[in-house]
Image (spheres, rainbow, N blue to C red):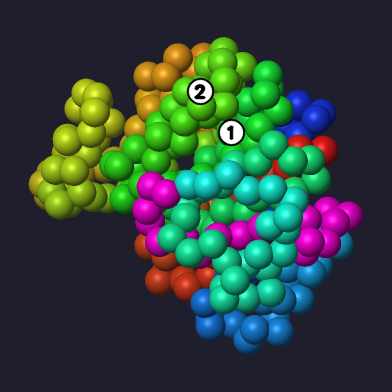
Amino acid sequence: MKLIPWNCFDEIEAYTTTAYDNDKILDMSYNDSLPYETVLKNRQNLAAQLNTDFDHMVATFQQHTTNFKEVSLKDGGKGMYSRDDAFIGYDAMYTKDKKLWLWTFHADCCPVLLYCRDQKIVAAIHSGWKGTVNEIVGKVTKHLIDFENCQPDEIYAYIGPSINQENFEAKDDIIDLVKKMSFDTSSFYQQKEDKAYLLDSKGLIQQQLLNLHVPQSHITISPYCTIKDEDLFFSYRRNKSPHRNITLIRLK
């Protein structure tokens, strides 16, 4: 299984899974698009490749909210064998515990990873367009600053593989919400001749971090586009794919 790493610091480990292995579909989501046993095996293979087990992994049941929660090793295994015991309605997690992998599912939505180096905290965030316009990344980051004593200049962020601006066509319903965000967003969308817009969701996420004084040099934006790089990633917008990649992180 090919994994795309976020090379940040030796004390953390972070990757994005890819969609295929010799034409085998590496879906990681229990959404009935593949037999349960197939998805379970894909997850087990990933755990083995990472030299870990399900007791050291945790996944939520994402619902495009801005809800987030702190998790610990006692939560290991939740959401791994099924959705039944996953934390429902949370789109972000953070932890202070070592050796606990935090999962976030995505196709065209944006996975965002945070590492607060001073407090040794990692976070995994799912930011689809709904999460982005409601500023989930900013809310999680502000919480870590205000309540976990993370200093902005000690925060590092990874904005992972997702839809790039040249392929993110949005209509007025989305752009009207973008315009209502807490900062000037006019530079993050461009109107086309057909009156639709091209939206820079990665840029909107980066700006949320910058607004909280996270240094730009600490923010890594993946160049991969889930629509363009179809040999690597699933994409709902490209072909209505029900499958999902994951981006995950742990403290060593």
Say which quarter of the image contains residue 97.
top right
The image position of residue 165, as x and y in percent, is 36, 41
Whether residue 62 appears in magenta in the rendering, the answer is yes
Magenta extent: 50-67
Which secondary structure, mark 1? strand
Name the mark nearer the viewer: 2 or 1.
Answer: 2
Residue 127 visible in image = yes
Say which quarter of the image contains residue 59.
bottom right
The image position of residue 168, as x and y in percent, is 33, 48
Residue at position x 66%, y 64% in the image: 78
Report whether 136 appears left or right of 162: left
The residue closer to the viewer here, 225 or 157, is 157
> In which quadrant will I find the C terminus?
top right
The 10 Å Cα crowd at callout 1, few under 14, some 14 to 19, many 20 or more, is: many
Q: Which mark is residue 114?
A: 1
The residue closer to the viewer here, 18 or 138, is 138
**Principal secondary structure, stretch drawn in magenta:** loop
Circle 2: residue type: Ile
> In which quadrant will I find the N terminus?
bottom right
Is the residue 113 above or below the residue 11 in the image? Answer: below
The image position of residue 46, as x and y in percent, is 78, 62
Is the residue 227 above or below the residue 155 in the image? Answer: below
Circle 1: residue type: Leu
Residue at position x 35%, y 42% in the image: 132
Which residue is the site of mark 2? 145
Residue at position x 47%, y 55% in the image: 90
Mark nearer the N terminus (2 vs 1): 1
Residue at position x 22%, y 23% in the image: 184
